[in-house]
């Protein structure tokens, strides 16, 4: 059995780790709260945007727009697909990064011409190590997502899309299902699908409203779509950031718990070792006293 | 006087909601005033200055808005913009800094995208400064 000093040292190191994991837990939980608030603040904007787009499409069902192009006719070998992959900058967040990267790689395997836009240090390292080509100019952090950053990201992607360098754009991110569960999502960002904006089960016999557009429906659409993409990217960034903090919170909670369990077990071991040492000392003293007694007689 | 319901939603918050008599928004070729019972319409908006009169007052309220659009349906007006600020909220020092920065960048050689960025931020800074100098 290890001696008491060794066990004590080990307990001290576990205690130090516990302090760190506990602090990280608290930091993540406060960051999570903040990012959730940010997401709530943008929700009305985003929902109104979506409903207006669906309204415009309802009035102009045969609008011929760059953003709604049909890519199903392009051959798979000739299609260039952009992937925006949202990972975290740092590890220690459970399976968060692993899930995203696994999902992304799965899709990469059956796409001949991928173009990767990776967000987050960890994902960049992962793809670099595997020798997968990623866009080097695309350097954004995922900490504290801002609208400005979302705007820059979507501008880069939209520019490439409008110049026909990308035929389709997908985004891989993590969504918060509820307060505890997260799920990796894989969604098509561009081109937009008209079906996504159709309102199902619209009561028939509704008076057809006569909506006008100034200066023209196309101009209005071209103004709205980039904003819609920005809103979407921003939503994905905030969701991912919240999920990251959530995963980290859970991982750190588990670590804190197992550190406490370890401390408990080590405490028992330490007491046992201490008791053994004391018992041995007493035995030695008694044995010494006995031999002295024998000498006197 | 008849009124309509106005909602101004910026990307990061609800800027204003309430009943109004009139609203003037910057559009692509100038300004447009919307009164009660306007026909259903969607207008693409440029960044600039927006004004509106609340139901029971004749005083104009001002706001600096970014790009977006206004939608009129059933006597309800929804203005959806990237940013919206009232003159009191504008940081003059920051706007001045942004103006100088944009002017400096425009003097240098830039890519087309950079040029658009700088001229857009120049326009934003100029509207901010114009509105603050007028109404504060």
Image: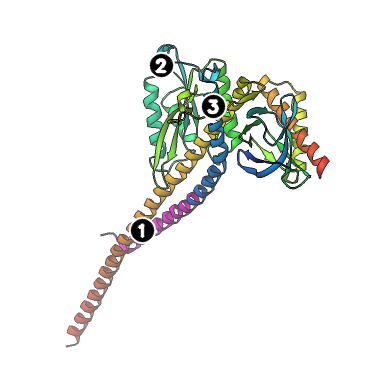
State the residue in front, A102 or A233.
A233
Q: Is residue B57 left or right of residue A7?
A: right
* For residue A235, side relative to residue B62 (left or right): left
Q: How many marks?
A: 3
Question: CA–CA distance between discs 1 and 2?
Answer: 50 Å
Give a yes or no on whether discs 1 and 3 share a subunit.
yes
| Callout 2: SS | loop
Name the residue located 79 percent from the left edge and 38 percent from the top edge. B131
Q: Colour mode?
A: rainbow
Residue at numbered disc 3: A208
B132 relative to A273, above or below: above
Query: Magenta segment: does it hold A157?
Result: no
Query: Which residue does the numbered mark 2 point to in the structure image?
Result: A112
Q: Which residues are magenta?
A: A1-28
Question: Foreground residue, A83 or A41?
Answer: A41
Q: Disc 1 sits on a residue from what chain? A: A
Residue at image x 42%, y 15%?
A72
Label 3 is found on which chain of the structure?
Answer: A
Q: CA distance from mark 1 to mark 3?
A: 66 Å
Label for residue A297?
Answer: none
């Amino acid at each position: 059995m290890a001696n008491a000093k060794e066990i004590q040292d080990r307990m001290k190191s576990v205690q130090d780790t516990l302090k760190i994991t506990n602090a990280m837990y608290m930091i993540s939980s406060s960051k999570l709260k903040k990012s959730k608030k940010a997401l709530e603040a943008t929700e009305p904007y985003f929902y109104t945007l979506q409903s207006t787009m669906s309204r415009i499409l309802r009035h102009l069902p045969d609008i011929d727009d760059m953003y709604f192009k049909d890519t199903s006719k392009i051959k798979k070998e000739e299609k260039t697909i952009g992937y925006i992959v949202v990972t975290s900058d740092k590890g220690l967040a459970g399976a968060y990064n692993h899930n995203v990267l696994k999902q992304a790689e799965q899709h990469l395997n059956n796409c001949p011409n991928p173009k990767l836009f990776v967000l987050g240090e960890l994902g960049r390292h992962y793809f670099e190590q595997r020798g997968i080509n990623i866009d080097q100019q695309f350097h954004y952090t995922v900490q504290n997502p801002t609208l400005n950053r979302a705007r820059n990201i979507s501008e880069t992607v939209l520019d490439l899309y409008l110049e026909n360098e990308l035929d389709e754009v997908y985004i891989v991110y993590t969504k918060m299902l509820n307060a505890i569960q997260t799920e990796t999502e894989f969604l098509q960002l561009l081109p937009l699908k008209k079906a996504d904006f159709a309102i199902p089960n619209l009561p028939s016999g509704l008076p057809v409203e006569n909506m006008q557009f100034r200066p023209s429906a196309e101009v209005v659409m071209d103004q709205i779509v980039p904003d819609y993409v920005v809103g979407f990217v921003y939503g994905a960034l905030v969701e991912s950031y919240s999920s990251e903090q959530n995963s980290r919170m859970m991982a750190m909670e588990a670590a804190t718990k197992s550190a406490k369990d370890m401390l408990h077990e080590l405490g028992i071991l330490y007491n046992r070792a201490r008791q053994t040492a004391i018992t041995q000392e007493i035995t030695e003293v008694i044995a010494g006293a006995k031999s002295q007694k024998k000498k006197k007689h | 006087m008849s009124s309509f319901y106005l909602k101004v939603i910026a990307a990061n918050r609800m800027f204003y909601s309430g009943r109004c008599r009139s609203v003037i928004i910057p559009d692509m070729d100038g300004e447009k005033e919307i009164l009660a019972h306007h026909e259903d319409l969607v207008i693409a908006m440029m960044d600039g200055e927006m004004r509106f009169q609340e139901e029971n007052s004749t005083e104009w309220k001002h706001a600096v808005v970014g790009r977006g659009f206004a939608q009129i349906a059933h006597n309800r007006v929804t203005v959806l913009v990237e940013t919206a600020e009232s003159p009191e909220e504008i940081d003059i020092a920051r706007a001045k800094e942004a103006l100088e920065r944009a002017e400096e960048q425009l003097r240098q050689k830039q890519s087309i995208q950079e040029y658009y960025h700088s001229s857009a931020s120049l326009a934003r800074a100029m509207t901010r400064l114009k509105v603050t100098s007028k109404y504060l």
